[in-house]
Amino acid sequence: MRQETLKTIAIPVLLAIKDKMTETYGLSVLDEKRLKNLILYSIRGPDYICFTFKDRTLTPLHTSAPGKALVAYLPERKRNALLDRLPFDRLTPNTITDRKTFEKRLALIRKQGYSTDIAEEINCCHCGGVVILDPNKNPVGALWLSGIDKRLDGRQLRANIRHLQGAAKRIEAEVAKQFLAKGRADRYSPCVATALRVLSKQPRQPADYAALAKSCHLSYSTLRTLFRKETGVTLGQYHLNLRIHEVQRLLAQTSSSITEIAAQMHFYDQKHLSAIFKKKVGLSPLSYRRQTLPPARQ
């Protein structure tokens, strides 16, 4: 799964648990080439001494909680190949520095359903990690939290991990929908497949459903009926979801004003965009932008 797609799915879910989390938390993926855990997105905890992580930060697989969770759930053959290349550098007195002990830890992670880092990477730092699995039970990402040991003892760490586990399940449900849609692509009728392709390539452009139907030598009503029957959503709902995903990307990755984004995406005005966005995402565009921009840009 593409990293941007995973972020688009995960960010609203992570923002929804912000009031429950006591420490900095976020989303990571496995960087197999560099043998690292790659942080894609993080939300800083509420305390003034909480950790801050820049997007694209790399952390070791054998010490970080998300890194261990990602490795633990790799298919056995792929996991063994990765472990053959993995250096077990000592970073603290608690760091695991041999493969045999590390493999025992991975087995425990699979059994209990989460991973921990008890000052294994940084002294006085405790972390937790939860894997995100696709429908084939392969890891596509991991959720994690990180905080100082005095505030994140065993009980508090597990409480935060439970919130991450719930979030991971919700993300997995959305990931499964993506995989299902992709798996069905070759089973769509030619016209529905064409409609999906055209709409997906041009999320910013107004959709001319009548012209789309005409290009397939169908009436608009026939296309509308086929599309809903085969995809489970209407043409309008599908296109609106694409547009909202593009708005999320523009809010997080550009400095365009909400008024400018509304114009680019062909909403009536800023108020129209804000109302629909809040209904779909659960936050206003401004709140979403504030919570998704890296700390340096806020």
Image: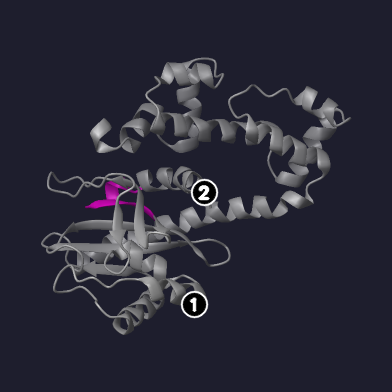
Q: Secondary structure at mark 1?
A: helix
Q: Position of residue 151 (x, y in %)?
A: 13, 59
Q: Residue at x 27, y 31 (%)?
A: 297
The residue that disc 2 covers is 2
Q: Amino acid at mark 1?
A: Glu
Q: Residue at x 66, y 51 (%)?
A: 182
Within the image, what quadrant is residue 152 found in? bottom left
Within the image, what quadrant is residue 35 found in? bottom left
Left or right of 141, for residue 48: left
Magenta segment: 17-28
| Residue 271, above or below 97 | above
Choose the circle earlier in sequence order: 1 or 2. Answer: 2
Q: Position of residue 85 (x, y in %)?
A: 38, 72
Calculate the distance from the C-alpha at mark 1 to the C-alpha at mark 2: 23 Å
Q: Position of residue 11 (x, y in %)?
A: 41, 44
Q: Which mark is residue 227?
A: none
The residue that disc 1 covers is 76
Residue 98 visible in image: yes
| Residue 227, above or below 2 | above
